[in-house]
Image (cartoon, rainbow, N blue to C red):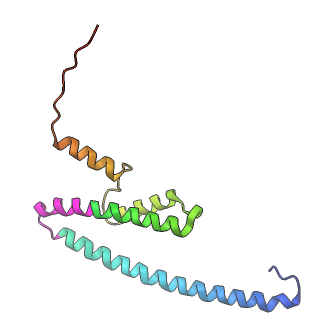
Amino acid sequence: MGAKSENDVPKIEEQRNKNDVALNNMLKRNDTLTEYSENEKAKYRELKDNLPPEELTVVREERSHIRENGILNVIHKLRDTFGKGYDYDLFKKSEIAVSKSLNEKPISKKSIHQQLQKKQQQAIPRKHKKHEIER
């Protein structure tokens, strides 16, 4: 157990007790958050299912923008908190799991800026200039 002598046993037992208390607190918090998540998903699905089709498209677009910004904020907070311990691949797996639980498509890997540029390019017809070839 890492005890070098009999004197270390009380310290190790105290640390084990602290770890048990911390584990119990984390398990309670996890249960609370799981219940909260399930309730919020149920509310979200109910709202989504009751929207008229013409409003659903607008809501999806707005949700997409809110979601993208939220994800960026979470990534920054996680990087600040965990530094080098932050794992982008683990975050992406979690993001995909959340998308599946909400029956949504995961956000594409394109940046928000790239997506906005693409929408702007599609909305504005381009005029091509003729270039003369000099010989």
| In the depicted structure, whether residue 74 falls above or below residue 119 | below
Asked if residue 63 lies in the magenta stretch, the reply is: yes
Residue 43 image point, x, y percent: 26, 76
Q: Quadrant of residue 67?
A: bottom left
**Where residue 9 sits: x, y (%)?**
81, 89
* Residue 36, magenta (yes or no): no
Does 21 appear above or below 85? Answer: below
Q: Residue at x 36, y 48 (%)?
A: 110
Q: Residue at x 39, y 61 (%)?
A: 72
| Magenta-tinted stretch | 50-64
Q: How many marks?
A: 0
For residue 100, which quarter of the picture? Answer: bottom left
Residue drawn at the location 32% of the way across and 47% of the way down = 114
Q: Is residue 75 above or below residue 17?
A: above
Quadrant of the frame with the C terminus: top left
- Magenta: main secondary structure equals helix
In the image, taking residue 118 as reference, residue 54 lies left or right, namely left
Residue lying at the far top of the rendered structure:
135
The residue closer to the viewer here, 85 or 90, is 85
What residue is at 83 percent from the left and 88 percent from the top? 8
User: Left or right of 65: which side holds 11?
Assistant: right
Locate residue 25: give its quadrant.
bottom right
Q: Position of residue 75 (x, y in %)?
A: 45, 63
Left/right placement of residue 125 relative to residue 67 reads: left
Q: Residue furthest front?
A: 134
Residue 53: % across, % down: 12, 61
Location of the N terminus by quadrant is: bottom right
